[in-house]
Image (tube, rainbow, N blue to C red):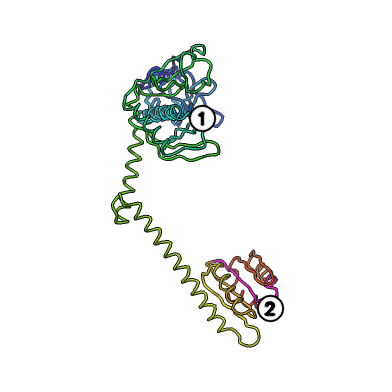
Amino acid sequence: MENKLYYQDAYIKTFKAKVIKQAQDSAGNWYVCLEQTAFYPTGGGQPNDIGTLADQHVINVEEIDGEIRHYLEGPILDTNKEIAGTIDWERRFDHMQQHTGQHLLSAAFDQLFEYRTIGFHLGAEIVTIDLETDVLTEHQVQRAEGLANQIILENRPIEVKWVTEEELSQYPLRKETKVKDDIRLVIIPDFDYNGCGGTHPKATGEVSSVKVLDWERQKKKVRVQFVCGKRVLKQFQQKQQVLLELTKILNAPEKEMEQAVLRLLENNKSLEKNLEQAQEDLLQYEAKRLLGRSNVNERKLVCEVFQNRTIQELQKLARIITTEDDTAKVYFVSQNENRLQVVCARGTAGTESMKKAVSAALPLINGKGGGNDAFAQGGGDALMSGEQMLQYLVETAH
């Protein structure tokens, strides 16, 4: 552990070291291994550090086969001399805040409700923990969040101890450790004792705050989303900006925002209902107009070419017509940019197969469709005009 400077002091930002290995992995990516490093490799739910080595950008750090690999954009030209390393401190401290906040929140849920943490992920925007429960209430979340923030406010020291497996029995661990050698405990006195390989600040006060954003049930567990430290301020700023914009758009103060949105949704539902009724009335009117134009001798033939009408509209219009007059036969074609859509229907007094008419026409436009003898539809490429398609449908059906 002596070469892992981040364990000696998590606040080390710069260091110097000798290169002990430079190579490419199986994918051709360059990496170096150092005699000592302050770069934390991905592990234990915590992402890796980034920064620079010998003025090269460190884009990833992983511990593989016992060696810490610092992945670079290219090779270091001179590996015989000592090189300087600088970690991205803003990213590191953010990870320290989030990881410690996770310890606090997990311990709070465990102590208050005996909900064990069975999963942890530190993302670029939010942090999540998976709790071993299938029920979580607003009241429970508030209590756990409140307790975690109380421990932060008390600014308790955060201690790190290296112990053997035999010494573990001296500590009230929140969960069993996975490793058996070089066991590292992160301790918040009288609150949380946990085996952990991540980086943490010296005291809980540096976490600043913990804020739960949301939670959701996933099978037999609950996933809790939260943020800590500077991320809390970032979330607040984002939400405040959205809220201020909404107050302007809705012309309502912040406290009345919920009611303003509810009123808007109700008005929208009413408008949609009125619009649907108006569209239905228009289709009824259009159906009567088309029937009036059809042949008044014997059975009525209703033919029309439309522009940019949906097939759903054509289907509804055809059904209205055939319901209104069971002797009617309907042939509709709609031209929609580079597509043709067809609907063929007949009333119950008819005997022609509309399915056969559509099936014969669709291959002409590389189309697909379906239906039955009384009602069929389909669509394809506009390889002919709407008028040509309509003429073909009428002739085929007869």
Residue 81 in view (yes/no) = no
Which range of residues does the magenta coloring cover?
338-356
Secondary structure state at the residue bearing disc 1: strand
| Residue 167 locus on image (x, y percent) | 48, 12
Secondary structure state at the residue bearing disc 2: loop
Q: Which mark is residue 285?
A: none
Q: Amino acid at mark 1?
A: Ile
Q: In this rendering, is residue 142 above or below 295?
A: above
Location of the C terminus by quadrant is: bottom right
Residue drawn where x is 46% and y is 25% of the image = 41
Tell which of 44 and 308 is nearer to you.
44
Q: Identify residue for label 2.
A: 350
**Is residue 238 part of the magenta span, yes or no?**
no
Q: In this rendering, is residue 369 above or below 23?
A: below
- The quarter of the picture where residue 371 lies is bottom right
Residue drawn where x is 50% and y is 31% of the image = 119
Q: Which mark is residue 118?
A: 1
Residue drawn where x is 42% and y is 65% of the image = 271
Q: Amino acid at mark 2?
A: Gly
Tag 1 near tag 2, CB within 8 Å: no
Q: In this rendering, is residue 216 above or below 33?
A: below
